[in-house]
Image (cartoon, grey):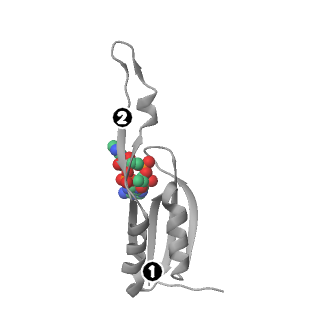
Amino acid sequence: MKMITAIVNKKDSGEVCDALAEEKFSFTRMATTGGFLKSGNVTLLIGTEDDKVDAAIALIRKHCAQRMEPIPSVVSAGVPAFGYYKAEVLVGGATIFVSPIERFEKM
Ligand code: 2BA
């Protein structure tokens, strides 16, 4: 068994969760905050059999898009001589970790 930890953009999370539920994956959705942008994203914990990991990742890939997002601290930093400037970073898609599960119990 494996645990997939998937950090997805909040804008894609609804579609990703609907697709996972439709394919009968069990998962937990958590509201999280990115350490760099300090804006909300969604972390999904998906416990699944080894042979279903690729299918879960394919679903996430299908429903997540990369986007340019502004960096708030830079947007608000004024440089009087040069005016205000706006910096952006490319935000995935999704960031995914797959970890082995030693023991799984439900009671
Ligand atoms: P954030 O930490 O808010 O990062 C948002 C985006 O900012 C990142 O997109 C990346 O393009 C950029 N970024 C992050 N740290 C940076 C830095 N020190 N300098 C310059 N740019 C930086 P993604 O890489 O697609 O990450 C999206 C979100 O996934 C992250 O939100 C974070 O919540 C999570 N994440 C990404 N890598 C992770 C990791 N190794 N461990 C844990 N969480 C991670």
Residue occupying the point 34% across, 48% down:
90
Q: Earlier in the sequence, mark 2 or mark 1?
A: 2
- Which disc is residue 101 wearing? 1
Type of amino acid under label 2: Ala
**Circle 2/circle 1 CB separation < 8 Å:** no
- Which disc is residue 10 wearing? none
Q: Secondary structure at mark 1?
A: loop
- Asked if residue 87 lies left or right of residue 5, the reply is left
- Which disc is residue 87 wearing? 2
Q: x, y percentage for residue 59?
A: 42, 73
Type of amino acid under label 1: Ile
Residue 86 position (above or below residue 28)? above
Q: Secondary structure at mark 2?
A: loop
Residue occupying the point 54% across, 83% down:
24
Q: x, y percentage for residue 106?
A: 62, 85
- Asked if residue 43 lies left or right of residue 65, the reply is right
Q: x, y percentage for residue 100?
A: 40, 79
